[in-house]
Amino acid sequence: MFLLEFLYGLGTGIALGLTGAGGSIIMVPILVYLIGMNVHNATGASLVIVGASSAVGVLGYIKDKLVHWRIALVFAMSGIVSAFIGSYLNVLVVPRIILYLFAATMILIGFLMLKRSKTSEAGNTKTPSLKNEMRKWYYLVGAGLSVGFLTGFFGVGGGFLIVPVLVVALKFPTKHAIATSLMIIALNSLWGIAARFLGIGTISTGPIVWILVGTIAGMLIGSLIAVKVKSEMLTKGFSYFIIAVAVYIFLRASNAL
């Protein structure tokens, strides 16, 4: 059992380290369908796993100076209030509805990642300036609010939304976007965990120690690979996988399976 939990985490961590997005979205299905946790506890436990693994994964990118700190802080700080709101609403919504919404979100993630897999690696390697760029501020704050809510409600990192905003709106190269995304995910997860420990929502770590160890190991492996190789094909393949899992969740929630 410990080996299986480690392998679940390992696969998730590798995906998250390689793409900066998507890996965390499969953690809730793993906790619900493979580990047997209830939906509310799974979303809380996912925050711990996603937040800790993202924090570890970003260390390698910091060493390579790929993390844009000011952008990460603006993005993450925008999501504090919405993360608390999402955590509060999580316990008010019945599990089946959460799973339906989760499946719909996964499909959206899959298509966004497919679109991102076609995005060029070209871009400015310097931190983009936000001076006199109100449209970029709107993108950052709006996306930060959205990701914060998703983090609190679903227990996901939100990299699927963060990376496209950084690449498209701020012209980040993909590797810089992935690195900055991991920092934002770690901070957003912290807000969601804090909300639950303050009594807004629920959190139960349960049997996640080996999953967390596996996820951190996978994150380190994925981050090392991502710095050296192109990840577009991996992102594309993982996108189809996410969509397939979303269909499975919908069918299970509908008692069709």
Image (cartoon, helix red, strand yellow):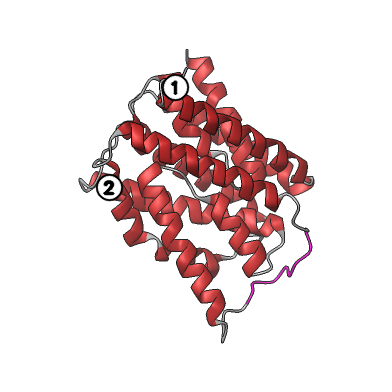
Q: Nearer the viewer, residue 207 or 75?
A: 75
What is the magenta range?
121-128
Q: Nearer the viewer, residue 227 or 245?
A: 245
- The secondary structure that most of the magenta stretch takes on is loop
Residue 9 in the image: above or below residue 166: above
Residue 107 in the image: above or below residue 65: above
- The secondary element bearing badge 2 is classed as helix
Name which residue type carries label 1: Tyr
Q: Residue visible at 50% across and 47% down?
A: 55
Q: How far apart are labels 2 and 1 at the CA level?
A: 22 Å
Q: Residue visible at 61% across and 63% down?
A: 166
Residue that mark 2 sits on: 89
Res 218 visible: no
> Residue 103, position in %: x, y?
48, 37
- The secondary element bearing badge 1 is classed as helix
Left or right of 24 in this view: 128: right
> Residue 176, position in %: x, y?
67, 59
Residue that mark 1 sits on: 33
> Residue 94, position in %: x, y?
28, 35
Q: In the displayed image of the protein, which residue is found farthest to the left? A: 199
Residue 4 in the image: above or below residue 58: above
> Residue 47, position in %: x, y?
40, 41
Residue 51 in the image: above or below residue 119: above
Numbered label attached to residue 51: none
